[in-house]
Amino acid sequence: MAKQKNKRRQFSSHRWVVLAAFIAIGAGILCYDMLRPDAYTLQGDKITWQNANKQWRLVNFFAPWCAPCLREIPALNALNSRVTNKVKIYGVSFDPKTATELTTLVDNLDIQFDVIVVDDATVFPMPYPKYLPATYLISPQGKVAASLFGEQTEQTVADALAKQGIGLPSR
């Protein structure tokens, strides 16, 4: 009888160990998902669309073959120099690019704002646009607050920001 009780205790303690292992694995997976950034910039900075620092995000999709996109870049560069810490501007290449190709493209187009490297793990709070130009204003809660399609100017983007209560300093 004593041997059977010991075997039961051993079996019971093994079940607890297995259960604890499954809980630990599940918690690890959950933490990994919660802590993993949504995207990375070309410089390796982490981006999480829903953010605690209450920063708005402006995401502009561009391509070198898109003439209106190319005309937007100087306006976005100018806007990037005016935005406060309440807004961060990101560019996204519409076409798939390696980091090396993207660096060359950014240099050739004189893009002066951060550019997101898109890979299989990249998560956007909006669907990938079907056409260009496409610009999205993302709230600090990670939600799309405005979708701007077609060529944008510094003023049209500033107006979209103003509609969300985000004023920019004068030039």
Image (cartoon, rainbow, N blue to C red):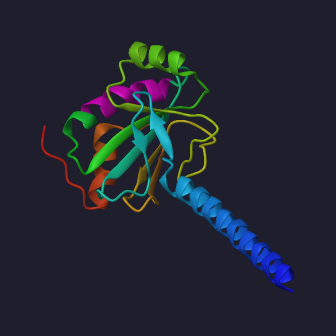
Q: Residue at x 51, y 57 (%)?
A: 34
- Residue 164, located in which quarter of the rendered image? bottom left
Q: Residue at x 69, y 64 (%)?
A: 22
Q: Where is 100 relative to 153, above or below?
A: above
Q: Residue at x 44, y 58 (%)?
A: 142
Q: Nearer the viewer, residue 44 or 64?
A: 44
Q: Nearer the viewer, residue 81 or 103?
A: 103
Residue 109 pos. (x, y %): 41, 17
In what quadrant of the picture does the N terminus appear? Answer: bottom right
- Residue 43 shown left or right of residue 133 in the figure: left
Residue 33 pos. (x, y %): 56, 55
Q: Where is 121 relative to 105, above or below?
A: below
Residue 14 pos. (x, y %): 74, 69
Say if the magenta span includes residue 118. no
Q: Nearer the viewer, residue 52 or 18?
A: 18
* Residue 150 appears in the figure: no
Say if the magenta span includes residue 68. yes
Q: Residue at x 40, y 26 (%)?
A: 71
Residue range (magenta): 67-78
In what quadrant of the picture does the C terminus appear? Answer: top left
Residue 125 pos. (x, y %): 53, 53
